[in-house]
């Protein structure tokens, strides 16, 4: 079994018209036993920047705490919020520092940049950035998510349609993965508001 | 306060403090993760007025295509570009690092960077990590001494060549170069040959795919032709798309407004004493 399959996770982020959505499943398991069904995998860095962490849960939490520390230092020095592109470079540097003894985490970063232009990116566990203009996926369900997103995604979707598309893609993909599921957690961010929704899914 | 210093931004370089724990996990039977690789076909050739570099745009994670349109031609200096194959994080980190070092060197000396400077910085870094930083590079540029093209292997050895290919698709691309290359090519002939070599890698090698990126560097000028050729466009796209008649069931909704609504008191006596 791979280290990535120890806890199980599914993460996806999609770009819409001046908005983005980031979604995750809610299961925390130890190999095949489920420990929690309300585990948070998406964290808020600031109102317009979210990071989801797939992979080993302990590394995800440690990495999140280190990133919050670095973000707060940045905020104190620069007196402004970090841009999503800058944050992505920060995460990449923090992960590459541990190149020969890495954190077993795959981050998915989503944010609204200058002029409320949506930005998404994902990385492998040593910080190789992958910027995409449509969608990014991570986690044990990533192969099913690639398929679901590739067929369901349309460019320039409005907020409500984007929410529906990302939810359908997430739920269909995790139904085909034993290690993720137990509902979904979706954050939909537009320039005026952040909508957090919990989805009902198969509880198996 | 040693524990506080551990999380503070470090001076640079690698940190090995998770290695022991990761070793223990591997011994317990957990397989390590696979990294994003750029399977790749990267090429370079010297033509009459300078250097042309080419690359495909597929990034793989095991057998899955992770990125259909990634950038493999990295900027090093205004007159020097570098294509990278191997582990994606390594090629990006090593080219970024040497690019910064070259910039500092330009400020220090007040001159344009030379290709051999970039070459020496890259090969000494890669050699000191004995091949563990898995980056195979094709470095090309034009400086005061003329056009140069080099290949750099992950262990730190280098070659200086008139035409070069690297990556999993290198044999497919080299076949094209060996049969059609000649000295003194014009710009258009060179670009056409590079595009043909990359296409050969895209169609014959499974680790390479998607589009062709080309970069033409001449004395005092460079042209980065991103997505010069797109031979793999999506064929069957349904116009209708997906429409979901049955909506997803939502258990809870929480809305946080980002802009505060300011209440304006029109003509009020708010400020009266």
Image (tube, rainbow, N blue to C red):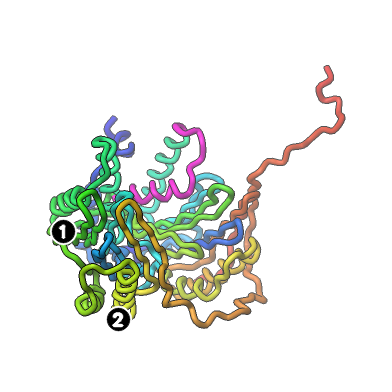
Identify the residue at horizontal 72%, vertical 41% (top origin).
B261
Decide which of A84, B217 is in the foreground and name it. Answer: B217
Mark 1, secondary structure of its residue? loop
Magenta portion: prevailing SS class: helix
Mark 2, secondary structure of its residue? helix
Identify the residue at horizontal 58%, vertical 64% (top origin).
A199
Identify the residue at horizontal 21%, vertical 79% (top origin).
B179
Q: Which residue is mark 2?
A: B204
| x then y, percent, for residue B157 | 12, 59
Decide which of B113, A67 is in the foreground and name it. Answer: B113
- Any mark on residue B131, and which? 1
Chain ID at mark 1: B
In the displayed structure image, the side of residue B144 where residue B214 appears, left or right: right
Decide which of A1, A130 is in the foreground and name it. Answer: A130
Chain ID at mark 2: B
Q: Mark 1, residues whose alpha carbon is within 10 Å: few (<14), some, or many (≥20)?
A: some
Q: Mark 2, residues whose alpha carbon is within 10 Å: few (<14), some, or many (≥20)?
A: some
Could one spot residue B107 in this view of the protein?
yes
Q: Is residue A174 above or below residue B157?
A: below
Quadrant in which the N terminus of chain B is drawn = top left
Part of the protein shown in magenta: A76-96
Could one spot residue A8 in this view of the protein?
no
| x then y, percent, for residue B121 | 19, 48
Q: Is residue B156 magenta?
A: no
């Amino acid at each position: 079994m791979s280290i990535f399959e120890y806890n199980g996770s599914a993460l996806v982020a999609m770009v819409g018209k001046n908005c983005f959505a980031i979604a995750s499943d809610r299961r925390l398991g130890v190999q095949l036993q489920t420990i929690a069904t309300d585990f948070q995998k998406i964290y808020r860095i600031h109102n317009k920047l979210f990071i989801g962490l797939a992979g080993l849960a302990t590394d995800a939490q440690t990495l999140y705490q280190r990133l919050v520390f670095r973000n707060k230092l940045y905020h104190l020095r620069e007196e402004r919020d970090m841009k999503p592109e800058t944050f992505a470079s920060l995460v990449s540097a923090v992960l590459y520092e541990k190149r020969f003894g890495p954190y077993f985490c795959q981050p998915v970063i989503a944010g609204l940049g200058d002029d409320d232009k949506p930005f998404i990116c994902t990385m492998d566990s040593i910080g190789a950035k992958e910027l995409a203009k449509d969608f990014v996926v991570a986690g044990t369900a990533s192969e099913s998510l690639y398929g679901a997103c590739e067929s369901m995604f349309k460019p320039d979707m409005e907020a409500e349609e984007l929410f529906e598309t990302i939810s359908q893609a997430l739920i269909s993909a995790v139904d085909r993965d034993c290690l993720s599921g137990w509902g979904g957690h979706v954050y939909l961010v537009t320039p005026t508001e952040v909508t957090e929704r919990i989805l009902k899914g198969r509880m198996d | 306060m040693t524990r506080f210093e551990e999380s503070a931004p470090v001076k640079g370089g690698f940190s090995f403090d998770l290695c022991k724990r990761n070793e223990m996990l591997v011994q317990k039977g957990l397989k390590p993760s696979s990294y994003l690789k750029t399977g790749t076909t990267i090429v370079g050739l010297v033509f009459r007025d300078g250097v042309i570099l080419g690359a495909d745009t597929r990034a793989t994670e095991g057998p899955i295509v992770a990125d259909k349109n990634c950038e493999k031609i990295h900027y090093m200096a205004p007159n020097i570009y570098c294509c990278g194959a191997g582990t994606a994080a390594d090629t990006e980190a090593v080219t970024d690092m040497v690019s910064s070092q070259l910039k500092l060197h330009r400020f220090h000396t007040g001159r344009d960077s030379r290709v051999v400077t970039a070459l020496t910085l890259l090969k000494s870094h890669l050699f000191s990590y004995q091949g563990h930083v898995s980056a195979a590079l094709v470095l090309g540029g034009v400086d005061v001494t003329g056009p140069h093209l080099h290949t750099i292997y992950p262990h730190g050895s280098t070659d200086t060549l008139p035409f070069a290919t690297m990556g999993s698709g290198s044999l497919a691309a080299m076949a094209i170069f060996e049969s059609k290359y000649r000295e003194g090519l014009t710009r258009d002939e060179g670009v056409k040959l590079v595009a043909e070599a990359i296409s050969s890698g895209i169609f014959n090698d499974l680790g390479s795919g998607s589009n062709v990126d080309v970069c033409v560097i001449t004395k005092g000028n460079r042209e980065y032709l991103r997505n010069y050729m797109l031979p793999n466009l999506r064929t069957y796209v349904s116009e209708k798309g997906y429409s979901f008649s049955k909506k997803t069931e939502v258990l809870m909704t929480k809305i946080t407004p980002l802009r505060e609504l300011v209440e304006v008191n029109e003509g009020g006596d708010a400020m009266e004493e």
